[in-house]
Amino acid sequence: MKIVRFSFDGKARYGEISGTAIQEIEGEPFRHIRLTDHYYQSDQVELLPPCAPSKIVTLGLNYHTYAKELNLPVPDAPLIFLKPSTTVIGSEDNIICPSTSAMVGYEGELAVVIKKPMWRVSIKDAMDYVLGYTCFNNVTVRDSQNHDKQWTRAKVSDTFAAVGPCIETELESDSVIVETFLNGKIKQQGNTSDLIYSIPEIINFISNVMTLLPGDIITTGTPNGIGVMYPGDTVEVKIKLIGTLKNSVIKN
């Protein structure tokens, strides 16, 4: 099932999308999914980010090939940091480059959407807490990242968490190809089979640090090939079965 979040008559709703048709879901899709008899066409609604997370937990250095590219040792535990909800945008929204930065980078990732409150979850039970998966662009100010000793300033500007276009509930996440394109040219291509820490291991680790809530997002790290984008560029993160997350880059 492909779940989208959309606005109609000023109200945010969820639905299952098939082609251009959207069948509305009763309420939110986290506890249960009940389809209504209300249908919409995608050109009748405003598509929103597919969920509204209270927080986003992102991972650094979680692909073996990326660690090798940077000539860094494999971390002995997942490297996590937070993005606030104010960073979230959807597909077709604009990424805004801060006027104070000359180096804004893309990081294409597979993201996990949580479906129920989670605290101290075992590796064995971790996948029971997953609603589905979506594409994610972990936008980063490279000059701040290189200058600061921690990454908060580099990661938390408005529009720095592009998510979408949908939540796919039936994806087999063990071997997923994640691709990033800049102006139509491929820049990143990784496979989740190369992850240093698996998705159940990531969920277990994070849930022993903090509580996660329905709609929260966990990203799984970016593969090698990160780079810089500039105003006027178009960046796309593509994952088969999920679709394409597409954003234009503009000046502040």
Image (cartoon, helix red, strand yellow):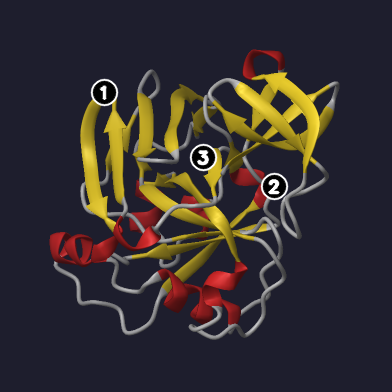
- Image-based side of 71 in relation to 116, left or right: left
Q: Residue at x 71, y 61 (%)?
A: 214
Q: What residue sits right under mark 3 in the picture?
A: 162
Q: Earlier in the sequence, mark 2 or mark 1?
A: 2
Question: Callout 2, which amino acid?
Answer: Ala
Q: Which residue is denoted by mark 2 in the rendering?
A: 52
Residue 229 image point, x, y percent: 33, 32
Q: Position of residue 42 (x, y in %)?
A: 63, 19
When asked about the image quadrant of residue 35, the answer is top right
Foreground residue, 160 or 188?
188
**SS category of the residue bearing label 1:** loop
Report which residue position mark 1 lands on: 184
Q: Amino acid at mark 1?
A: Gly
Q: Earlier in the sequence, mark 3 or mark 1?
A: 3
Indicate whether 119 appears above or below 114.
below
Tell me where residue 37 sits by quadrant. top right
The kind of residue tagged 3 is Ala
| Residue at x 64%, y 77% (from the top left corner) | 210
Distance between the alpha carbons at the discs numbered 2 and 3: 12 Å
Q: Mark 3 to mark 1: distance in Å?
A: 18 Å
